[in-house]
Image (cartoon, helix red, strand yellow):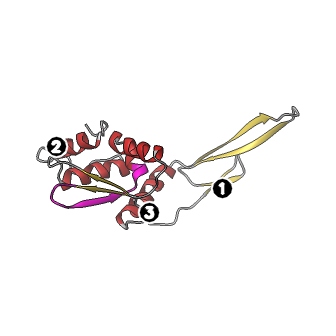
Amino acid sequence: MGVKHSVWQESTHNYRLPEDEGGTVRSTDETGSEESKQTYHSATHAQQMFQTLEDFRHSSLLTDLTLSIQNGQSLRAHSIVIAAVSSLIRQRLQEQDAGCSRGEIQVHLGPEVNHMGLATVLEFAYTGAITTLHRDTAAQIQAAALALGVPRVL
């Protein structure tokens, strides 16, 4: 990971990273006077945020969801990240919220789900990518996506 160098932008008289965007927004307040606000947008923010969450997952930091498969293997994850793509986990969170209980969520998946398929669905949730998709793994990934209710993977 290298150091990113900022670039002087003459039009705004500010420094910015090359992939970032900024602009000036003019608005009128309650008194009718016009004010100018600077905005900043990082084009890499979402990617960096999900990379950090994935790093947290691999170190089991702040994970609150355990997904287990038939052979006893399990994977830990952040329920909020998985709920963003999985209807099953979203439903479990809603049920938990209705009962006002907070804490660990454990989900046991059926025999149709194996470790590789489950790990791939988690990879998709955290990165938006599937790097292990090929003819030999498609059925395993599909089984995990169906079990968790992840239509974007299907």
Sequence-wise first label, 3 or 1: 1
Q: Is residue 151 above or below residue 124?
A: above
Q: CA distance from mark 2 to mark 1?
A: 46 Å
The first of marks 2 and 1 along the sequence is 1
The image quadrant of residue 103 is: bottom left
Residue 75, disc = none
Q: Left or right: where does residue 110 sit relative to residue 81? A: left
Under circle 1, the secondary element is: strand
Front residue of 10/27: it is 27
Marks 2 and 1: which is nearer the front? 2
- Mark 3–mark 1 Cα distance, whole angstroms, equals 35 Å
Residues drawn in magenta: 69-81
Q: Give the quarter of the image for residue 144.
A: top left
User: Which quarter of the image is occupied by the C terminus?
Assistant: top left
- Residue marked by disc 1: 15
* Image location of residue 24, percent across then percent down: 71, 41
**Does the residue at mark 3 contact the one at mark 1 (Cβ under 8 Å)?**
no
Q: What secondary structure is found at the residue carrying circle 3?
A: loop
Q: Which residue is label 3 attached to? A: 62
Q: Which residue is mark 2?
A: 138
What amino acid does circle 2 point to?
A: Ala
Say if mark 2 contacts mark 1, CB within 8 Å. Answer: no
Q: Is residue 16 magenta?
A: no
Relative side of 28 to 118, left or right: right
Residue extending farthest to the front is 99
Mark 3 residue type: Leu
Q: Secondary structure at mark 2?
A: helix
Percent position (x, y) of residue 99? 46, 46
